[in-house]
Amino acid sequence: MTLTPLDAAAALIVLAAFLGYLNHRLLGLPQAIGLTVMGAAASLLVILIDFVVPYFHLVATLTAYLAQIDFHEALIDGMLSFLLFAGALHVDLSELRRNKWAVATLSTIGVLLSTLIVGAGFRLLAALFGVDLPFAWCLVFGALISPTDPVAVMGILKNAKVSKSLESTVAGESLFNDGVGLVVFLILVGAAVTDQPISFAHGAELFIVEAFGGALLGLCVGYLGFIAMRSIDEHNLEVLISLAMVMGGYAIAHHIHVSGPIAMAVAGLLIGNHGMKHAVSERTRDHMQKFWSLLDEILNSALFLLIGLEVVAISTHWSAIAIGLMAIPLVLLARAGSVWPPLAVINIFSARLRGSFPILLWGGLRGGISIALALSLPASPMRDVILTATYIIVVFSVIVQGGTVGSVARRVTRRVEAEA
């Protein structure tokens, strides 16, 4: 049976509401973690039933349903623009400015360092299990798994009581490094698919155009929205203007080939700070914050449920699963190797981020963006291994790291305060 887009969306929202209700009444887990766990459990139950009673073809039905949703298109070309804008609305721009060098370094050099470390380590893991994975494809995996997911990170930060300085750094890094990671991913995929050596000059040019072009577009879109909101006082229309900024701005970014994620992060920062202070009334501010908070919650619920359901897409071959499990400590090691050096240099000149390494390390959650990029890879044996490893790491990140980063943050904060 072919589902219409409305059917697919309705089924997803109904399932998210049902499982969210069960989680709230029975498990009491944070929404993102609970829906990921229950989505994965539901998928595993479908696989088990299909194994016992293959007549029902439940796995084929679920796989066909997920294929009609198209996780990559739904997230990268749909949800992501709204989620980034909504997340950026709550980031303190003054704190972000104070930590601009930390955010810039972690979201650029940190991503590149992590990509190289993961790529090299993944090549060794694949060889250890007898899987011939070209180094170019290992770097592709490094690029898609290195950026921290702003949706996962900012959802957890809401409940973790960390300093404003650290919160702005973690949030700022997660907002911008996914745009940087996406550009690096596209460059590396192009080289891997064509089997051509990477042109660093072309890669640098593409990176500059995508990243800085996206930032410039975000400033333009945000400024136009700011001017329009400042000239009127009608809360429903101003909320509509903010929605138009996101949908129109992301569409423009797609057509002129600049980074839409970076554009939406910049536009959200501008509206969330200058716009909320100087362009809107108290009533409009309240309506806009409630609208974007509700939209953020709905899309988050759908996204993390999809992450759980995508378990049916992974390979069941033991070598791919073993590589994925071994890649968990590899990714954590790469995160440490990409965070500690720049943080050590920054701490020489400023004490604002003192003691923040454990939180930056453990709070570097991976989420739906990594799975969406893995699903976008062309069909091949390399894709199966990469997708399986990506899924295992993301589920570990959301459930284990996401479930414990709050307690890690509280312990670190108490220790820093005691030493002060």
Image (cartoon, helix red, strand yellow):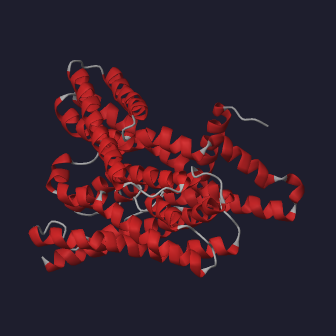
Residue 401 image position (x, y, % from top left): 44, 69
Residue 301 image position (x, y, % from top left): 52, 48
Query: In the image, what residue occupies the spot 40% across and 34% down?
Result: 250
Q: Nearer the viewer, residue 409 or 242?
A: 242
Vertical placement of residue 46 versus 392, above or below: above
Task: Report if residue 398 is visible in the image.
Answer: no
Residue sitting at the far left: 349
Residue 76 image position (x, y, % from top left): 49, 43
Could you tell whether 322 is left or right of 139 in the image? right
Q: Nearer the viewer, residue 255 or 268?
A: 255
On the rendered image, what quadrant is the N terminus found in?
top right
Query: In the image, what residue occupies the spot 43% across and 34% down?
Result: 254
The image quadrant that residue 280 belongs to is top left
Task: Report if residue 357 is visible in the image.
Answer: yes
The image quadrant that residue 68 belongs to is top right
Could you tell whether 189 is left or right of 98 in the image? right
Residue 26 image position (x, y, % from top left): 59, 61
Vertical placement of residue 241 versus 10, above or below: above
Query: In the image, what residue occupies the spot 38% across and 32% down?
Result: 256
Query: In the image, what residue occupies the spot 46% across and 55% down?
Result: 188
Vertical placement of residue 316 versus 272, above or below: below
On the rendered image, what quadrant is the C terminus found in?
bottom left
The total number of labels drawn is: 0
Could you tell whether 240 is left or right of 99 in the image? right
